[in-house]
Image: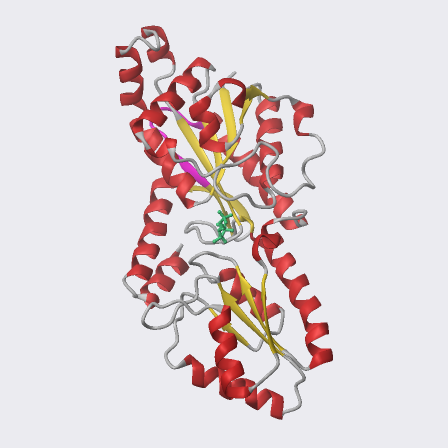
Amino acid sequence: GKGIAVFTSGGDSQGMNAAVRSVVRMGIYLGCKVYFIREGYQGMVDGGSNIVEANWSSVSCIIHKGGTIIGSARCKDFREREGRLKAAKNLVENGITNLVVIGGDGSLTGADLFRQEWPSLLDELLKTNQITAEQREKYKFLQIAGLVGSIDNDFCGTDMTIGTDSALHRIIEAIDAIVSTAYSHQRTFIMEVMGRHCGYLALVAALTGEADYVFIPEEPEENWQKTICEKLAQERQAGQRLNIIIVSEGAIDRNGDPITAELVKKVVVDNLHQDTRVTVLGHVQRGGNPSAFDRILGSRMGAEAVMALMEADETTEPCVISLDGNQAVRVPLMECVKQTKAVAQAMADKEWEKAVALRGKS
Ligand code: F6P
């Protein structure tokens, strides 16, 4: 059977374990040898005990756990060719020519590059006598299937990334908890949520948590100080006992300057003299048990990734398993990476409408 390795890379997210479990079991079911690569790309570069064969029971009892049991890392070494050369050698030595990478856009971009370089990496390993001519021939094709694991939901090509739904559950729980204390003391709370440069978590949290105002990177406002003060004052006059404001960690104004929770607090306190507190949710959002949705999403995507690898031949382009409506489908990795980069570029160029349109298109 084929040699498949699964690894998790970048920031962890809830549901990654479900995906790992599914890859292992689907792979074994189809007669493959399945390996874990521990600690993401770092484990691939370091090799040794970081690359171990998995069996059916090594993924028992993990579907309900947050994080990733095989570890994750943001790896510097893999960004250098030297590191990728070591990684290629370790894969060849273990007979691995199929990779399932579970991670965010950086991790998937890295995978894309690795695959493009694969023939030249093998040539170099052969030239320096690190692999044999037989190995060079036997392992000449590297196949890759990507799964997007990230709480940010910032990857073009999929409706939902693995972990986003669980993070939203965590945020909503926190908002609900804050609401009860805010109500008692007639306070205003500014809550900062994660998402990097993507406002998805903040926007959905604001809608479902009945927030009064939300700041997201995709819609930088002019003169927000005036708008927010008018809105909050009006609500208090109408008898509302509390206010909730959600600030995405990447929120910016029209000049591209950050709008932080502390800054919003200052504006509210200075202008309205409201009793105001800031709550930064931080990594709580990334922890805890995955929701049923993320367990199913990870499981379906993991199984689909293995099927994609099984059906691939040397002409097959690497794919990302994406959720399209209610279907797990394969989309070209390179296109998704390109589009995700185009969104980032549009944001950097302060072309927000273009960024939103590009993101929406995928
Ligand atoms: O990409 C996931 C994420 O949690 C972002 O929302 C956040 O900006 C970042 O990772 C935090 O990174 P770290 O865990 O390295 O502090």
Q: Where is residue 87 in the image (x, y as percent from the top left)?
A: 40, 23
Q: Which residue is drawn at 57% across and 78% down?
A: 212
Tally of numbered discs: 0
Q: In this view, does 166 lie above or below 58?
A: below
Q: Which residue is drawn at 52% across and 81% down?
A: 268
Q: In which quarter of the image is residue 169?
A: bottom right
Q: Provide the residue span drawn in magenta.
A: 311-320
Q: Which residue is drawn at 63% across and 50% down?
A: 293
Answer with left or right where residue 32 lies relative to residue 290. left
Answer with left or right where residue 282 lies relative to residue 257. right
Q: What quarter of the picture does the C terminus occupy? A: bottom left
Answer with left or right where residue 275 lies relative to residue 5. right
Q: In this view, does 25 lie above or below 285?
A: above
Q: In which quarter of the image is residue 255?
A: bottom left
Q: In this view, does 261 lie above or below 323?
A: below
Q: Is residue 86 above or below residue 201?
A: above
Q: Where is residue 147 in the image (x, y as percent from the top left)?
A: 49, 40
Residue 255 lies in magenta, yes or no? no
Q: Quadrant of residue 141?
A: top left
Display coloring: secondary structure
Q: Position of residue 151 (x, y in %)?
A: 53, 51
Q: Which residue is drawn at 39% across and 68% down?
A: 252
Q: Where is residue 294 in the image (x, y as percent from the top left)?
A: 61, 47
Residue 314 lies in magenta, yes or no? yes
Closest to the observer, 43 or 164: 43
